[in-house]
Amino acid sequence: MNWRLIYKQGAQLLLVLLSALALKQYYATASVDQLRWILAPTTFVVELLTGSQFEFESHAGYMSSDRRFVIAASCAGVNFLITAFLMLSLRKLWSERKTSWRFIPAAGLVAYLATIVANTFRISTALYLQRTPLEIGWLNENQLHRLEGIFIYFGFLLLLFLVSERKGRSKRSEPGTAPSSIPDQARTFSSNQADARVRPATSESQVHRDGLLRQSFFPLLVYYATTLGIPLATSAYRTGPVASDFLEHSAFVLLAPLILLLLFATFRLAVRVASRGLPTADTHAGGRNESADHTDSADVLIPSV
């Protein structure tokens, strides 16, 4: 057992968790003036996309020119920043036994940029809904605003996870990296070398798609931990009206991401079904082999994964 590696991973995990908790504590007490490091670039991009003009007012935030919309401290998206940072860092520690300390600031930078993008999209959507209100009978204005935020933030968190997984997979597939995790025993190679090259790649791609869907629950768990677990652990849960509002918030946080994951799973299933219906190179090759020799066609059978 490599104790030095275990101690290093433990120290890295501790630093990641302490960094997230420190940022959470900072955000809980920070004023809007102290959050300009994330509000200013977000507001700048919002102005570019929407054409709206904002001006910073101390202790209030970025006020729109018509004074009907303010980008306040609650719009900073620091909770999303913490969630994205934890998701990227913990996934890195989980998937790679040996990793340098550089991944921690790198994850922080990626999470910061992703927060600006997600926040820009959310604020722009809120501006649009303010100008053209969306009426849903069973949701009031505050509930609709909350639902919009959860959908956008978790949607971008899921997108960030998928992009990072694809990038990590492409790095692992480069020459000199670790081989595929699919065991050789799970593959039956054809005597025809062309078929043997096509079939394993298709099977591996299918395994990756199925595994990616299962792994998508990882960002969900991190999202639950930061949006529900941390508030409970830091005594954000109170009695009276605050407790009632927190229970309503919890219901939205629990259900909305599950709806997004259900839509994502449905989309992946539709893509998989559609891809199965398309003719592939190995299908044509198998047809030619079957017409020439029934023995060859039997050799190319590979169990579905």
Image (tube, grey):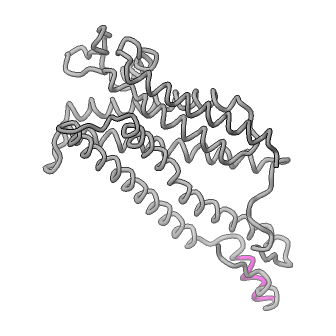
**Rendered view: 182 above or below 159:** below
Q: In this view, does 176 lie above or below 103?
A: below
Counting from the top left corner in percent of width and height, residue 11 is at: 68, 34
State the residue lying farthest toward the left. Answer: 137
Q: Judge by depth and name the residue closer to the eye, 270 or 182.
A: 182
Image coordinates of residue 58 in percent, x first then y, are: 31, 8
Direction from residue 10 to residue 250 in the image, left or right: left
Foreground: 104 or 10?
10
Q: Find the residue positioned furthest to the top.
A: 58
Kindly identify the residue that appears in the image at 20 percent across and 16 percent down.
67
Q: Where is residue 299 in the image (x, y as percent from the top left)?
A: 80, 84
Q: Is the magenta stretch mostly helix, strand or loop?
A: helix
> Residue drawn 24% across and 45% down?
248
Q: Where 213 sits versus 40, above or below?
A: below
Residues in magenta, as a range: 284-292
Where residue 203 appears, as percent x and y from the top left, is 69, 68
Which of these two is toward me, 39 or 12? Answer: 12
- Name the quadrant containing residue 129: top left
Residue 24 within the segment the image draws in magenta: no
**Left or right: 16 with respect to 66?**
right
Residue under the point 52% across and 31% down: 20
Return the residue nearer the eye: 33 or 122.
Answer: 33
Q: In which quarter of the image is the C terminus?
A: bottom right
32 with respect to 41 (left or right): left
Numbered circles on residues, count: 0
Q: In which quarter of the image is residue 208?
A: bottom right
Q: Which residue is drawn at 69% across and 76% down?
A: 283
